[in-house]
Amino acid sequence: MKNNEMKDVSGFMIDMDGTVYKGNDVIKGAPEFIERLKKSKTPFVFLTNNSSSYREYYLNKLLRMGFDVTIDDILTSTTATIGYLMKHHSGKKVYPVGTPKFIEEIENAGIPINDKDPDIVLLAFDTTITYEKINNAYQFIKKGAIFIATHPDDLCPTENGYDVDIGPFIRLLESMTGTEAIVIGKPNPLMAKTAAEKMNVPLKGTVMIGDRIYTDMKMASDSGIRSILVLSGEAKEDDVNGMKTRPTMIVNSVDEILR
């Protein structure tokens, strides 16, 4: 690192969409950056708010793109949400609004699924969303179910631009029910704490790398850790002017880090 503020890094938290790839296109130099981390024996973990698929999907995607990683290097908002549910709402019935893969993952974790009288409505990035699902979620929340969302992203990066993500649906249900969602993924500091525990390093020494100001950079700021904003995804350099807390560094892409 050329920046003195990046000395004594205990580990890197690395966003995925817009940071190391966009859709099915790898960002130039990203696999080489991971190799530099491995050679320097610097711990790292990939973080993604995308809850539409399970960890094995992301592992296979990264391997196809040339990243030398294992499943233990990946933390998704689904994984963090499962941990939250098991710790704070063990045994409670959940109505999931998500893809079949998402539902399968939470079922495999032993979380009881219920579409009649759930204790919790769990909203994920659902590319199979229907009116029936939205209406069911509304009805259950109005009757008193806890409202939990895996992450707050408005858009999901693709190789051709962006797709609508979970954020608009969170706001729809909040406005209709008058109930504020509990959001687990970035920018919740819980995600950073979970990542540091996964790397077995102190949170204070970690650095968050990402392309989004309202999730990646905000999580770093709220967690009291350093951050690197990459301009390979959603954020542009001009966007930093409106930030309350500036990133520790701004680079064009991860390829510039550790050069």
Image (spheres, helix red, strand yellow):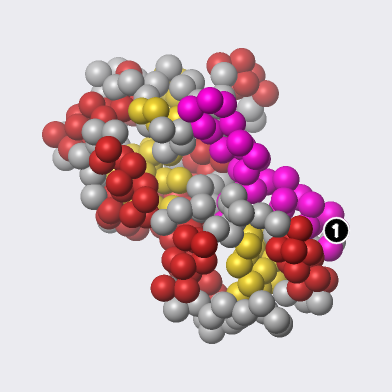
Q: Residue 80 in the image: x percent, y percent?
A: 46, 60
Residue hosting label 1: 176
Q: Does residue 255 appear to the left or right of 151 in the view shown?
A: left
Q: Is residue 81 visible?
A: no
Screen quadrant of the N terminus: top left
User: Residue type at mark 1?
Assistant: Met
Horizontal relation, residue 173 to residue 13: left or right: right
Give the position of the C terminus as an image quadrant.
top left
Residue 194 sits in quarter: bottom left
Magenta segment includes 91: no
Q: Position of residue 239 (x, y in %)?
A: 62, 21
Please name the residue shown 53% across and 71% down the image: 85
Name the spot of residue 180 as percent of width and height, x first: 75, 59
Q: Nearer the viewer, residue 79 or 192?
A: 79
Give the answer, above or below, for where 46 lies relative to 36: below
Left or right relative to 223: residue 118: right
Place of residue 173 in the rendered image (x, y in percent of width and height, measured from the top left):
78, 57
Question: What stretch of residues is rendered in magenta?
Answer: 150-177
How many numbered tags mark residues here? 1
